[in-house]
Amino acid sequence: MDSDLKFLLLLVGALLLTASLIGWILSRRVRSEAGRVTVANLNARIRSWWVMVAVFSASLLLGQAFTTVLFALLSFLAMREFITLNPTERADHEVLFWAFFIILPLHYLLVGLCWYGLFAIFIPVYAFVFIPFRRVLSGETRGFLSSTARIQWALLVCVYAVSHIPMLLALPLRGFEGQNAKLLFFFVLTAQLSDVLQYVWGKTCGRRPVAPLVSPHKTLEGTLGGIGTTVLISTSLWWATPFAPWQAALMALLICLAGFFGGLVMSAIKRDLGAKDWGASIAGHGGFMDRIDSLCFAAPLFFHLCSFYFAESDPRPPDWVFSWLGR
């Protein structure tokens, strides 16, 4: 087991322990009703983070197969939330069965096989074409375009985009062989830390809303403070990545910006649907989709930049796969 990865996971554990201690002290000292509500929400978030970090750490330590299964389950739960908030017709049910129980597992099987060539086009091409084909067989035309687009969007965001995260483990990086788990850690830490620090900065000194009609709690001060602090922290971890310090800074900035705008896009969808959160599965955070909305938009960008500039080639499945297929 990579000693650097162990150190990084222990560092996150120490940060959570510190946050838990601060939350406990605040719960003892804050007296106002509004302050108690805020501290209670903060402590609920911290408790949820303990669980999420434990599950994520265990998957990294257990290897690529377990990480792939974890993100497949996460995609399933996120897509379930997405579809639940979007009204569907009876004619959509068989299409949804294909989306959840055929397309999603097959796509993550490609991730497990490291079959990048088919992975890259399976959902954007084949699933995109299949869904309206299957929907039209129902003979129902009412709401055809909207329901088809919703299912395609759910697959694209919740499955295809998210699956780029475990696919990072398959990248053949120059001079970084066998250490891809640290690259995945860098990406997830940067995206999630940006969310947390934007929340903290916004609560402490946020004044001017960035997009009041879309996400009224996001402020300019919180956004700039959170992103700036995250870039500094992530840049200090350049030694755990295949990047030089300035490259780590640029990658961290890209992740933060993509995550910020991704969060705004998903907030706009929630507002359009009249919902505050995607669900209530994670105490203090909302639903699974609320927790990974920033990952969805940042993951494909980060993966392809790493592939283009730092990988020797695209991920390729084992030779037995092609032999089994007769190629």
Image (cartoon, rainbow, N blue to C red):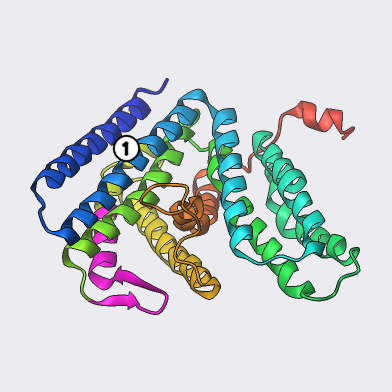
Taking the magenta stretch, the answer to whether it contains residue 210 is yes
Q: Which residue is mark 1?
A: 239
Could you tell me which residue is drawn at 66 percent across and 67 percent down?
Answer: 87
Query: Is 297 above or below relative to 190?
Result: below
Q: Amino acid at mark 1?
A: Trp
Mark 1, residues whose alpha carbon is within 10 Å: few (<14), some, or many (≥20)?
few
Left or right of 201 on screen, residue 311: right
Extreme residue toward the top, this view = 1
x, y percent for residue 209: 29, 76
Query: Is 227 above or below relative to 170?
Result: below
x, y percent for residue 268: 49, 72
Taking the magenta stretch, the answer to whether it contains residue 162 is no
x, y percent for residue 175: 46, 33
Name the quadrant of the C terminus. Answer: top right
Residue 279 seen? yes
Left or right of 202 on screen, residue 278: right
Query: Is 217 above or below relative to 259?
Result: below
x, y percent for residue 187: 42, 46
Could you tell me which residue is drawn at 56 percent across and 51 percent down?
Answer: 78
Name the quadrant of the N terminus. Answer: top left
Left or right of 88 on screen, residue 193: left
- In magenta, the rendered stretch is 208-230
Residue 312 seen? no
Could you tell me which residue is drawn at 44 percent across and 39 percent down?
Answer: 183
Question: Within the image, what quadrant is residue 85 found in?
Answer: bottom right
Left or right of 32 on screen, residue 267: right
